[in-house]
Each structure stands twice: as structure tokens, then as C-alpha cells.
Image (cartoon, grey):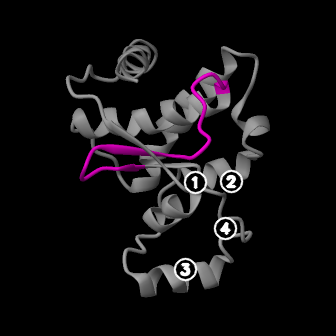
């Protein structure tokens, strides 16, 4: 995994002018439910139960897309969902997306708001998919409006 992370970090630096990093992220594979808890910061059993009651056990309630990975900035850890496959271009693009956040953290890059950090991450993810004749919109059932809202401050 370390060599894959190093290669992605170099690719990001070359393609997007991001700074080189010396420390790779930690990577953990966890359940989709654990990703959901981390995304909504549901750390207590009570908060987890309330979240599950709200979203019905998944993150596709019409208000947001399902989270397939998350980057935990305080610990420098990328969490991927069980079943993630390093041979699948779409799965690798998820790792690329989260690696952008790690490079942003390690490079001390600052943004107007958390959503603004996502613009570069989605651009890198799409460029990665393009190398395989794929794209972000088809592989992740994403539309231009949702992408715009996900990457804009104050919308």
C-alpha cells in the first residue's frame, strides 16, 4: 500500500502542482456503517442510534450521497469501505480523492471552507478515472449540480 500511496502522491504533485509529502497517510478498511458514523461524527452509541434512525442505516436518503471513504484529518487516516479493491479504477479514484485531502493537510494548504477543499479532490478523482476511459459522473452517479453544491462555500 505504501508504494501505491507514494505513486498517487507523485501523480498529484505532477498533475495538480500539490506539494510533495514525506509522511503517507494511515489507511484502514472499515464497514460502510463506520464511515457513516465518522462522516456525521456520531461517536457515542446514542448518536449512532439516532443517526441510523434518521438515515435508515445508509447515507442515501436523498439529502446526500453515500460516503464510500473519509479522511480523518486529526489522525491522518484514510478510511475505505470493506470491499475496496486496488485493481478497480473507481475504487482507486476514491483513494486518489482522499489522498488529495492528506496532501492538503500535510502541505498546510488552507481553503475558504471545507467544501472548497473538495473541488481539487473531485478534479483529481475525475482525471484519474479519465485515464481509464471513465468519469466521475458515470462511475459515481454524480451530476454537475450536485458536484457544484458539494464544492462551493455558502451554497
**For this view, does 151 lie left or right of residue 45?**
right
Specify start and end residues of the magenta stretch as a single range: 71-89
Spatial CA distance of label 2 from label 3 is 22 Å
The percent coordinates of residue 53 (x first, y second) are 62, 85
Q: Which residue is mark 1?
A: 150
Q: Which residue is mark 2?
A: 146
| Tag 1 secondary structure | helix
| Residue mark closest to the camera, 2 vs 4 | 4
Q: Earlier in the sequence, mark 3 or mark 4?
A: 3
Indicate the quadrant where residue 103 lies: top left
Q: Is residue 148 left or right of residue 1?
A: right
Q: Secondary structure at mark 3?
A: helix
Pointers 2 and 4 in contact (C-beta within 8 Å): no
**Other-residue count near label 1 (Cα within 10 Å), few / some / many at <14 / 14–19 / ≥20:** some
Q: Which residue is mark 4?
A: 58
**What is the x, y in percent for residue 60?**
71, 65
Which type of secondary structure does the marked residue at label 2 adopt? helix
Gap between marks 1 and 4, in whole Å?
19 Å
Residue 73 is inside the magenta segment: yes
* Residue placed under numbered mark 3 in the picture: 51
Q: Quadrant of the N terminus?
A: top left
Amino acid at each position: 500500500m505504501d508504494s501505491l500511496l507514494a505513486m498517487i502522491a507523485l501523480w498529484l504533485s505532477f498533475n495538480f502542482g500539490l506539494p510533495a509529502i514525506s509522511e503517507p497517510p494511515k489507511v484502514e478498511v472499515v464497514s460502510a456503517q463506520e464511515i457513516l458514523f465518522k462522516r456525521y461524527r456520531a461517536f457515542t452509541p446514542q448518536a449512532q442510534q439516532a443517526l441510523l434512525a434518521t438515515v435508515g442505516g445508509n447515507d442515501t436518503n436523498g439529502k446526500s450521497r453515500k460516503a464510500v471513504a473519509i479522511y480523518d484529518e486529526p489522525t491522518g487516516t484514510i478510511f475505505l469501505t470493506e470491499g475496496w479493491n486496488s485493481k478497480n479504477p473507481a475504487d482507486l479514484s476514491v483513494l486518489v480523492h482522499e489522498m488529495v485531502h492528506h496532501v492538503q493537510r500535510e502541505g498546510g494548504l488552507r481553503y475558504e471552507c471545507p467544501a472548497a477543499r473538495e473541488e481539487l479532490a473531485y478534479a483529481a478523482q475525475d482525471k484519474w478515472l479519465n485515464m481509464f476511459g471513465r468519469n466521475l459522473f458515470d462511475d459515481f452517479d454524480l451530476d454537475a449540480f450536485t458536484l457544484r453544491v458539494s464544492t462551493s462555500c455558502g451554497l
